[in-house]
Amino acid sequence: MTSHERLTAVIERINAACRAAGRDPRTVHLLAVSKTFPVEAVRALHALGQRAFGENYLQESLDKIAASSGSEIEWHFIGPIQSNKTRPIAEHFSWVHSVDRLKIATRLSEQRPPGLPPLQVCLQVDVSGELTKSGCTAAEAPALGAHIAGLPGLQLRGVMAIPAPTDEPAQQRRQFRAVREVFEAVRRGLPRSAVESFDTLSMGMSGDLEAAIAEGSTLVRVGTALFGARDARP
Ligand SMILES: *Cc1c(COP(=O)(O)O)cnc(C)c1O
């Protein structure tokens, strides 16, 4: 399949899922996850009108950002964050979906260059209870969200999650519903000034975007269905 055919197919899946859920397709944004794929693949999709791209691995992403400077691409960091790697993330990305502890949020806040718009951040939550995974717990999320919403240089936009993979649609729905409940709990704990911009439920990937949209996702992060299967990371 060509890039154009893949992008069209993904957009059609999003539109169909929105129709099935009675939602306006304009309320669901597509983040193209380009990790492991070369900058040429990013350019090809960008030329077709795709604007937002997600990356997991810092060095790889910085190379791609440098190679595409001057374009209107909006870069989202979605991978695990080590605290000694926050500065380049704060300097080069528009969004970060994987903020899961205060130390990371504080460093991003301090390191966001003052000349740039606030870094748009999502709180990553782990609803599967796999303690080895990234993400704060559902119980920690409201206090953490309220704290992050008060940090300068950041704008808290919502919640991100990567539920345990399953092919079972009912199980996918249950997990995404749990994420939405965390989103609502965090929102209830925010000061009024932070509520309006708290609008992003970042959930759903190539294999489960329909279930995520049915449960309220406003941003699906799609890699494989847009770029093809990934090789194991070199
Ligand atoms: C790789 C990745 C995706 C995309 O997954 P696909 O199954 O290839 O669509 C989405 N979100 C995160 C956080 C990822 O690491």
Image (spheres, rainbow, N blue to C red):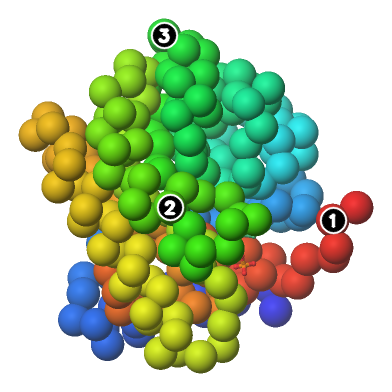
- Percent across and percent down for residue 135 are 51, 50
Q: Residue tagged by mark 2?
A: 137
- Percent across and percent down for residue 201 are 33, 57
Residue at image position (78%, 66%) is 230
Tag 1 secondary structure: loop
* Residue 15 drawn above or below residue 223: below
**Left or right side of 71 for 84:** right
Whether residue 157 can be seen here: yes
Residue at image position (21%, 56%) is 184
- Percent across and percent down for residue 160 are 43, 53
Among the two numbered marks 3 and 1 on one chain, the one whose residue lies closer to the N terminus: 3
Q: Residue tagged by mark 3?
A: 114
Q: Amino acid at mark 1?
A: Arg
Label ID, residue 233: 1
Marks 3 and 1, Cα distance to the nearest angstrom?
A: 35 Å
| Label 3, residues with CA under 10 Å away: few <14, some 14-19, many ≥20 | few
* Residue 210 drawn above or below residue 105: below
Instruction: Answer with the quarter of the image where residue 194 lies.
Output: top left
Camera-side residue of 19 and 136:
136
